[in-house]
Amino acid sequence: MLDLTGKNALVTGIANNRSIAWGIAQQLHASGANLGITYLPDEKGKMEKKVAELVEPLNPTLFLPCNVQNDEQVASTFAAIQEKWGKLDILIHCLAFANKDDLSGDFSNTSRSGFTTAMEISTYSLIQLAGAAKPLMTEGGSIVTLTYLGGVRAIPNYNVMGVAKAGLECSVRYLAAEMGPANIRVNAISAGPIRTLASSAVGGILDMIHHVEQVAPLRRTVTQIEVGNTAAFLCSDLSSGITGQVIYVDAGYEIMGM
Ligand code: NAD
Ligand code: 0WE
């Protein structure tokens, strides 16, 4: 059975009740995991308050600010895990960012700084967090990140994020190869389009969702909870033979040619 009792899980990427990370956190909690939650801090402390209220019912035993562009915040996050938990079993990497200008128009207009930003926050952060998690995963572990089909196919407007996701999926393979001997598994979930804070800021997302509803074998999109259930599986012993993979949770859309 799917049982995560006794497992310590760090979940990044919760911004609100539509976040994919929120669906994942709920399903890890339902499976018995002990949760640590990080949030992206802002100047006014609004995000801290909002996320704290949201996650309270999941009884997190760690709640920390962690902007992946800030090395000190990343270091204190893992220092707190070491101090409070002693070991880490599960890391959920569920964050991405590109400048809005780089998510429309000609891909060939992508600036050097826009490319760097997307790669640093959306791709390097997995390598960074996995590297910090590795020494704490003393009894093995599971690392799960979120990707999108735009890393494999040319999806209109996904542009520089597609390059970032291709790098992310490749990083999953290199991290899995490195960490397998320590019984740390690394996998990605490729989710179909879901309305979230990040996706709603993108023009045309509703049309894309409508298209998926017509074409995907299941004739619908997926929910954050369905992604959360696959994440719980990938974090549990039920998936003990799976590493380095990209698993599609997309109502089957990826298999279709027309
Ligand atoms: P979301 O806006 O709820 O989550 C994105 C998160 O990234 C936010 O919590 C934000 O605070 C965080 N973030 C951004 N910059 C950060 C930084 N510098 N440091 C720390 N955190 C930072 O949107 P979401 O759709 O739930 O996105 C989560 C993940 O799922 C992303 O990797 C995204 O690419 C992926 N994904 C989303 C969809 C979709 O359609 N929504 C589909 C496939 C994959
Ligand atoms: O990965 C994503 C979202 C990525 C994202 C979204 C934003 C919007 C607001 C990264 N950075 C930003 N920066 C902002 O300022 N998805 C898979 C959702 C998504 O985004 C798209 C999509 C889909 C689907 C962008 C263009 C086309 C399709």
Image: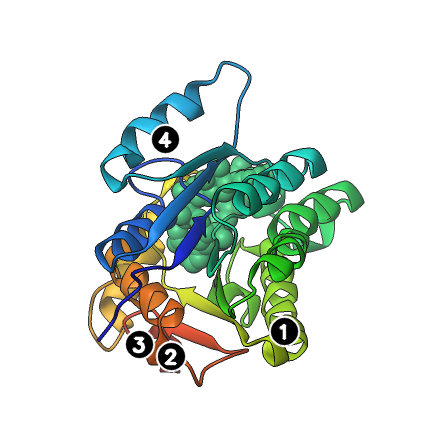
Query: x, y percentage for residue 218?
Result: 20, 74
* SS assignment at label 3: loop
**Residue at disc 2, secondary structure:** helix
Q: State the residue lying farthest toward the right.
A: 112
Q: Return the residue found at the far top.
A: 44
Q: Look at discs 2 and 4 and give the one toward the viewer.
A: 2
Amino acid, disc 4: Val
- Residue 215 visible? The answer is yes
Nearer the observer, 6 or 10 = 6
- Tag 1 or tag 4, which sits nearer the N-term? 4
Compared to 132, does 137 lie above or below?
below
Residue of label 2 = 239
Rendered image quadrant of residue 230: bottom left
Q: Position of residue 151 (x, y in %)?
A: 56, 66
Mark 3: few/some/many CA within 10 Å (<14, 14-19, 20+): some
Q: Which residue is mark 3?
A: 252
Residue at mark 4 to residue at mark 3: CA–CA distance: 32 Å
Secondary structure at numbered mark 4: helix
Element under label 1? helix
Is residue 211 in view?
no
Disc marking residue 179:
1
The residue wearing badge 4 is 51
Tell me if residue 177 comes above or below residue 87 in the rendering.
below
Q: CA distance from mark 1 to mark 3?
A: 30 Å
For the residue marked with disc 2, what is the amino acid? Ser
Residue at (37%, 82%) from the top-left corner? 255
Q: Earlier in the sequence, mark 1 or mark 3?
A: 1
Q: CA distance from mark 1 to mark 2?
A: 16 Å
Q: Amino acid at mark 1?
A: Met
User: How packed is label 1: few (under 14 Cα within 10 Å), some, or many (20 or more)?
Assistant: some
Please report whichever mark, 2 or 3, sits nearer to the chain's N-terminal start.
2
